[in-house]
Amino acid sequence: MKHATSTLLAATALALTATTAVANENDAAMLKLASTSGCLTCHSVESGKPGPNGMAPIGPAWQDVAKQYRGKPGAQDFLTRVVLEGSSPYSSHWKGKVSGLSMPPNAVAIKETDARTLVSWILSLGQ
Ligand code: HEC
């Protein structure tokens, strides 16, 4: 019996390690995609990081985006559109919280399927 328990524990530990490894791999892949698509010039992942010259960051930290939109119906579709088409400086969604007035359209820099994948990763941050 003792033997069976420790085998079970070992198997559980292995499963946990595997899950963590997959999550990290996904993080690395997502960070690479964000970086090659130019997102990280304006965004940080972690909240609370200052922007250039200690000003407010140019765009909202993605952990803050997750907090703001997670669980809202249609958030993934909405944010994928904003990423591809950009936002309007006349109706900033993050007015006063960031130093950038609006996000330029990113459709030139990222494919729609990649934008959707990245947005779903952003929405999962900080869980
Ligand atoms: C030139 C700077 C810049 C780049 C490059 C940029 N963003 Fe943004 N992003 C912003 C700004 C500024 C905002 C805030 C817009 C607002 O207040 O409406 C923003 C907002 C967002 C939001 C929240 C949108 C909302 O309506 O609340 C998401 C998600 C986002 N960006 C993802 C991305 C992704 C993914 C990329 C790369 C493909 C990217 N951004 C590239 C500046 C940028």
Image: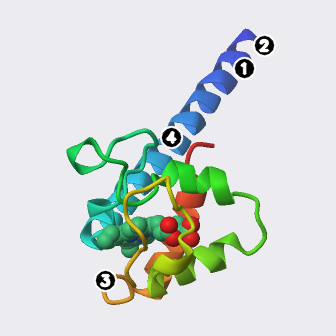
Q: Do the residues labelled 4 and 1 touch (CB within 8 Å)?
A: no
Q: Mark 1 points at which residue?
A: 4
| Kind of residue indicated by mark 2 | Met
Which of discs 3 and 1 lies nearer the camera? The answer is 3
Residue reaching furthest top?
2
Which comes before the other along the chain, label 3 or label 4? 4
Considering depth in this image, is 12 or 88 the residue closer to the camera?
A: 88
Give the class, few, some or many, for how many residues have Cα within 10 Å of label 4's Cα (few <14, many ≥20). few
Q: What residue type is labelled 4?
A: Thr
Image coloring type: rainbow
Identify the mark nearer the N-term, 4 or 1: 1
Label 4 lies in ligand 1 vicinity (Cβ under 8 Å): no
Which residue is denoted by mark 3 in the rendering? 109
Label 3 residue SS: loop
Q: Kindly give the residue lying farthest to the left in the view shown.
A: 53
Q: Residues within 10 Å of mark 1 (few under 14, many from 20)?
A: few
Residue under circle 2? 1
32 or 21: nearer the viewer:
32
User: What amino acid type should be assigned to the residue bearing mark 1?
Assistant: Ala
Contact flag, marks 3 and 1 (Cβ < 8 Å): no
First in residue order: circle 3 vs circle 2: 2
Quarter of the image for the C terminus: give it. Answer: top right
Residue ID at (25%, 70%): 36
Q: Where in the figure is residue 32, as x and y percent of width and height?
A: 30, 62
Q: Crowding at label 2, few (<14), some or many (≥20) Cα neighbours within 10 Å?
A: few
* Secondary structure category for the residue under label 1: helix
Cα gap from disc 2 to disc 1, whole angstroms: 5 Å
Mark 3 vs mark 2: in front: 3
The answer to whether marks 2 and 1 mark residues whose Cβ atoms lie closer than 8 Å is yes
Cα distance in 3D space between marks 4 and 1: 25 Å
